[in-house]
Image: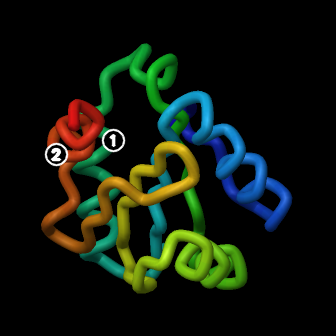
């Protein structure tokens, strides 16, 4: 989908983390070989509303090609690596993290209200 910003290198991750100081950043960590990950991604994309990217910066991470970035995300945010995983970041800190079947866009959006 065209709303995603792709994380392809550590500089991109560092920029996303900096951006979280101004606007919430959402990272979807996806394993392209996992059917559960594909199901979670499909459900997430179906629930995304056009224009929401003005409120939240959505980032997509292909775990198979960029495990180094995933490892750095886990280290920087002190969250356990999972796949699939959705992490919402505000002010450089994880405020929401879910994995597998528990990934829900509405719950991530609710976390922003707290």
Q: Is residue 97 left or right of residue 16?
A: left
Q: Looking at the picture, how far across and down is residue 10, in whole percent? A: 80, 66
**Which quarter of the figure has residue 85?**
bottom left
Disc sitting over residue 70 in the figure: none
Residue at image position (54%, 44%) is 91
Furthest-right residue in this view: 11
Between marks 2 and 1, how big is the CA–CA gap? 14 Å
Q: Looking at the picture, how far across and down is residue 31, in whole percent? A: 46, 76
* Mark closest to the chain's N terminus, 2 or 1: 1
| Residue picked out by circle 1 | 45
Nearest the eye: 38 or 24: 24
**Which quarter of the figure has residue 75?**
bottom right
Secondary structure beneath dot 2 equals: helix
| Residue picked out by circle 2 | 107
> Compared to 12, does 74 lie above or below?
below
Residue at image position (81%, 65%) is 9
Nearest the eye: 68 or 6: 68
């Amino acid at each position: 989908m065209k709303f995603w910003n792709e994380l392809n290198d550590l500089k991109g991750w560092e920029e996303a983390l900096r951006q979280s100081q101004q606007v919430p950043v959402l990272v979807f960590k996806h394993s392209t070989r996992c059917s559960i990950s594909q199901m979670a991604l499909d459900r997430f994309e179906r629930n995304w509303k056009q224009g929401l990217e003005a409120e939240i910066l959505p980032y997509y991470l292909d775990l198979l090609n960029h495990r180094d970035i995933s490892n750095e995300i886990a280290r920087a945010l002190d969250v356990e690596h999972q796949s699939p995983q959705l992490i919402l970041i505000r002010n450089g800190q994880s405020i929401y993290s879910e994995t597998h079947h528990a990934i829900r866009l509405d719950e991530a959006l609710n976390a922003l209200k707290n």
